[in-house]
Amino acid sequence: MKRERRFLVLADGSLTPLDAKTAVGALRFIPEQVVAVLDRSRAGRVAGEVLGISSRVPVVSSVTEGLERGANALLVGIAPVGGELPAEWRLWVEEGLRAGLDVWSGMHTFLSEDASLWALAAEHGARIFDLRRVPLSMPVAARRAASLPCEVLLTVGSDCNVGKMTATLELHRAALADGIRSRFVATGQTGVLVEGAGLSVDRMISDFAAGAVESMVMERSEAADVVMVEGQGSIFHPGYSGVTLSLLHGACPGAMVLCHHAGRTAIRHGGNPIPGYGDMVRAYETAASWVSPSRVIGVCVNTQGFPEPEALSEIVRAARETGLPACDPIRQGPGALLEALKSHLSARRSRA
């Protein structure tokens, strides 16, 4: 999966931080592999200007323009609720396959199981990769990760789509740069795309989801100081809490980072209120303790779209209400979280 890829990313009408999570993840963490983004409503601009991130990747209006810019693969840049490919996008996928482009998708609906698309790929020498495809079974979790000599860190959230993957990858990269032997465990389709390995845990049969997480943590733990596990969903989410608990009880983290999108007061799909920072910390530490003790060591506040004064005010509030270091790892860098991790690792070594 690490072969050279030059993606044209499909995000038509959806090029926003919340709707095009896969597109944004690719632009932020593997920018050298993205040649263009297809969004007819924003064609002629650059992706960074649209999304508020550092990116000069052009936004185009057709597959032909992507091919002219050197694309050799097509990436479906969204993962909508329900996992269906928008009907209009199918025409672009077909056009890409006819041009010999490999197609990468992180949706729940597997494009490789579509007979007509598979036939097109075979006819034109293209391949279809479904990033959410997982084994049918894995071991049942048995608390094995709780006994590792290295630390395990899990990002947890107030809701889905609040920045857990971004926080994990930013902290992972900062730790590596600081000389900490960090390993990253991808648990969602975008993380798998970026890392080139991992499993989308939300596709696992529920009996085996925690075991899949446990197995990945065990595999990455060799010669590691810390294994960082990408979080999914939220224990407060009516639809995705089961995925979150599978991560929490499979990974058995000793440390957690709480992630929240500033200004969000209710779950996006469900509408139930999001608790305050302090209540969320206590809830996650309690839920973790049912299997293995853990504590939240820092707070990641996603302040995208907020002016600087309001953003800093929210970060200060998160720190005050929890008594923990807080930061926005994109706006400020992950330094506060890195220092919290280093202090935690030092204390862990002292106890050992």
Image (cartoon, grey):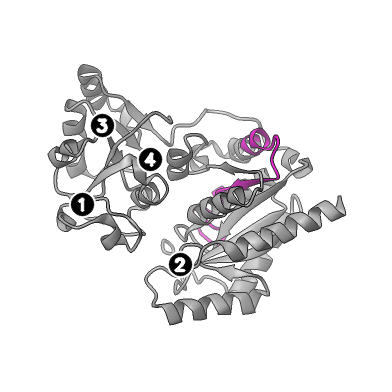
Dot 3: within a 10 Å radius of its alpha carbon, few (fewer than 14), some, or many (20 or more) residues?
many
The three-letter amino acid code for the residue at tag 3 is Asn
User: Which residue in the structure is indicated by mark 1?
Assistant: 59
Nearer the N terminus, badge 1 or badge 4? 1
Which residue in the protein does label 2 denote?
A: 331
Q: Nearer the viewer, mark 1 or mark 4?
A: 1
Separation of marks 2 and 4 at Cα, in angstroms: 27 Å
- Position of residue 48 in the picture relative to residue 185 (left or right): left
Pointer 3: what residue? 72
Q: Amino acid at mark 1?
A: Val
The kind of secondary structure element at disc 2 is loop
Contact (CB < 8 A) between labels 1 and 4? no
Q: Position of residue 86 (x, y in %)?
A: 24, 45
Disc 4 marks a residue whose amino acid type is Gly
CA gap between label 4 and label 3 equals 18 Å
The reply to whether the magenta stretch includes residue 159 is no
